[in-house]
């Protein structure tokens, strides 16, 4: 629309320039006009050779080749006789009957163009004023007849959460039943959880089930650089909601506007975002009542929201939407498979896939199903088999295979020893997660991977579990040192060392697992400041020194144990490396067969047969910040 208006303006300007050129430039081009009496004199003197008569205009050519033009007085017919008597060749062109149109255009077109340009500019100014007025209008989308078609049956993996929100749905359907007993529906419901767990989907399902008007807006739509716009949009949002009450108002990513107020921060108390938040607080529970309006908000960061926003009367209920467990993942997979009508092969067991995807959110599972379908289509299959799900999960968790990556045989051998060291240490630890497979195929940023998967979802970890994880992390570096010496160790263990150090530090300083330091909590960020309010308290140099000494002791002892394991079973390691160099990927059963052949006292085992189908490279869920994805 803006481009069309610009073209119209330039068209008008161009037309005016052409018209001005025709009007004023024509006078310069026609500078050979002469008076009629002068023209008659030139004819009588024999200077005119030829003349063309068109109506009352005469265009003549002199004997010198010069053109002259004159106008004949109306009704003067003797001009023909004068020209004939003086031997002038005469051409007569009939007068054009449409000449009045040209005259009209020349005389009136400039006036019409100026009037049109003036009207256009006035409308632009009026439109600018209207846009300035509508700038404070809310950008919320109101769904009246076309409500979301999502139902609670389409939301899987969160049965407890759905039970919580059913009460709100019942209130919207029959508010009188609650009012008789003096009850009221929650004014606000805050849904928080990790990205992809289904917060927005749940809000759509609530609107679809309640069959009431649904108003949707994002928290970022309130934020503008102009003062007062955000607060005005909040007012307009609730005015719209009052007109359609009872209704649902959904604010996605509310942390964009609901962040805790700084008071005397960089923006002071008059920051635009803070004024928007103040208006939101007043609208949700202020002097005016908003009967029949229920606000549902979603965020990934509830810890940064303003406390006034979370108090009862505003967001009465704060519902955590967790990542699904095994049963929830199974239900989510069923929903996506049925919704997309994906034909599955006879070997596909969704429960097996659910067990092999710990820590996956609903969005991750939807992506897994979609990737498997794309892989099957690429292979021109009629059905999606377990092979596609296996490959899709490897692609998601470990990245694409870098088949074209040039790796020298010596580097490939070192990678094989490194991954075998991880795997051998893990199978000899009773508290480690079961081994699934070992691969030296480069994927993503990793040159190789050792996959350990739990048989069930885990939520807490003991000291023995964490120590087993540190030993497993050191297995790769220990194998390098045993077979190549201290001068032959590589940079491939950087991520292992970083994760082991981080884990050991948390065991000592955050989880109080060692008596030498005591049950204290010190964040990994040593000091708190205004940019990192979550950091731990200041500690003395003596305490920091003791923590460092204890961490160093844990890491040295763990590395020594891992090195002893590799040294005691060097023959088994070499046999596994030879098989790994030949096949590039070996399963848990193949690994255990070699261990049994060389007498390795295996204390761990492979996953159950019904589980040991899906591979992944992600570690199980652990406390935040403890373990990044393995490499």
Image: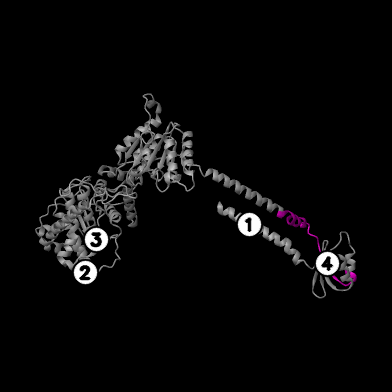
Give the Cα distance between marks 2 and 3. Answer: 19 Å
Q: Position of residue 495 (x, y in %)?
A: 24, 58
Residue furthest bottom as drawn: 64
Residue stretch rendered in magenta on the structure: 83-110
Looking at marks 2 and 3 on the same chain, the residue that comes earlier in the sequence is marked by 2
Looking at marks 3 and 1 on the same chain, the residue that comes earlier in the sequence is marked by 1
Q: Which mark is residue 494?
A: 3
Q: Are marks 2 and 4 in contact (CB under 8 Å)?
A: no
Give the residue pinned by disc 4: 34
Residue 147 visible in the displayed image: no
Mark 1 is surrounded, within 10 Å at the Cα level, by few (under 14), some (14 to 19) or many (20 or more) other residues, namely: few
Q: Are marks 3 and 1 in contact (CB under 8 Å)?
A: no
Give the residue pinned by disc 1: 11
Looking at marks 2 and 4 on the same chain, the residue that comes earlier in the sequence is marked by 4
Q: Is residue 71 left or right of residue 189?
A: right
Q: Describe the element under mark 2 as helix, strand or loop.
A: helix
Residue 468 visible in the displayed image: yes
Q: Are marks 2 and 3 in contact (CB under 8 Å)?
A: no
């Amino acid at each position: 629309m803006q481009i069309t208006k610009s073209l119209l303006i330039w068209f008008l300007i161009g037309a005016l320039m052409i018209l001005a050129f025709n009007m004023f430039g024509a006078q310069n081009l026609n500078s050979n006009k002469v008076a009629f009496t002068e023209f008659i004199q030139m004819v009588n003197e024999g200077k005119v050779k030829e003349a063309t008569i068109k109506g009352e205009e005469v265009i003549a050519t002199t004997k010198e080749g010069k053109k002259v033009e004159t106008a004949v007085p109306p009704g003067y017919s003797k001009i023909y006789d004068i020209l004939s008597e003086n031997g002038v060749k005469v051409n007569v062109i009939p007068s054009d009957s449409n000449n009045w149109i040209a005259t009209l255009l020349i005389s009136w077109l400039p006036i019409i163009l100026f009037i049109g340009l003036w009207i256009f500019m006035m409308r632009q100014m009026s439109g600018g004023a209207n846009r300035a007025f509508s700038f404070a209008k809310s950008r919320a989308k109101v769904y009246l007849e076309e409500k979301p078609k999502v139902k609670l049956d389409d939301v899987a993996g969160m049965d407890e959460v759905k039970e919580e929100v059913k009460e709100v749905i019942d209130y919207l359907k029959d508010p009188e039943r609650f009012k008789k007993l003096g009850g009221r529906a929650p004014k606000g419901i805050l849904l928080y959880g990790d990205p992809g767990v289904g917060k927005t989907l749940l809000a759509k399902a609530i609107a679809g089930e309640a069959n009431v008007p649904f108003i949707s807006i994002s928290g970022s739509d309130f934020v503008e650089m102009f003062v007062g716009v955000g607060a005005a949009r909040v007012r307009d949002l609730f005015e719209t909601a009052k007109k359609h009450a009872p209704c649902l108002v959904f604010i996605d990513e509310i942390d964009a506007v609901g962040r805790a107020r700084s008071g005397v921060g960089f923006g002071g108390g008059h920051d635009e975002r803070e004024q928007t938040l103040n208006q939101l607080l007043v609208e949700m529970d202020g002097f005016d009542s908003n009967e029949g309006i229920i606000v549902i908000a979603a965020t990934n960061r509830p810890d940064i929201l303003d406390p006034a926003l979370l108090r009862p009367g505003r967001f009465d209920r704060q519902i955590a939407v967790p990542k699904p467990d095994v049963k929830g993942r199974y239900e989510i997979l069923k929903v996506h498979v049925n919704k997309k009508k994906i034909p599955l092969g006879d070997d596909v067991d969704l429960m097996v896939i659910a067990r092999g995807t710990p820590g996956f959110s609903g969005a991750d599972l939807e992506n897994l199903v979609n990737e498997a379908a794309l892989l099957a289509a690429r292979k021109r299959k009629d059905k999606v088999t377990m092979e596609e799900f296996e490959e899709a999960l490897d692609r998601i968790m470990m990245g694409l295979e870098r088949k074209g990556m040039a790796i020298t045989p010596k580097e490939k051998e070192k990678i094989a020893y490194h991954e075998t060291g991880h795997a051998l240490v893990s199978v000899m630890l009773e508290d480690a997660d079961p081994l699934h497979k070992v691969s030296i195929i480069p994927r993503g940023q990793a040159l190789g991977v050792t996959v350990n998967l739990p048989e069930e979802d885990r939520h807490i970890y003991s000291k023995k579990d964490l120590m087993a994880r540190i030993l497993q992390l050191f297995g790769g570096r220990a194998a390098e040192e045993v077979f190549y010496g201290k001068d032959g160790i590589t940079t491939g263990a950087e991520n292992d060392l970083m994760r082991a150090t981080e884990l050991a530090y948390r065991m000592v300083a955050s989880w109080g697992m060692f008596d030498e330091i005591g049950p204290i909590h010190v964040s990994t960020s040593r000091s708190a400041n205004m940019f990192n309010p979550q950091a731990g308290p200041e500690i003395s140099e003596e305490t920091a020194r003791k923590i460092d000494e204890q961490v160093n002791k844990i890491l040295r002892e763990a590395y020594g144990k891992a090195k002893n394991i590799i040294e005691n079973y060097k023959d088994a390691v070499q046999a596994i490396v030879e098989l790994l160099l030949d096949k590039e990927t070996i399963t848990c059963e193949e690994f255990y067969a070699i261990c049994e052949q060389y007498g390795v006292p295996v204390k761990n085992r492979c996953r159950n047969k019904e589980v040991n189908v899906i591979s992944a490279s992600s570690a199980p869920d652990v406390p935040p910040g403890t373990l990044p994805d393995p490499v």
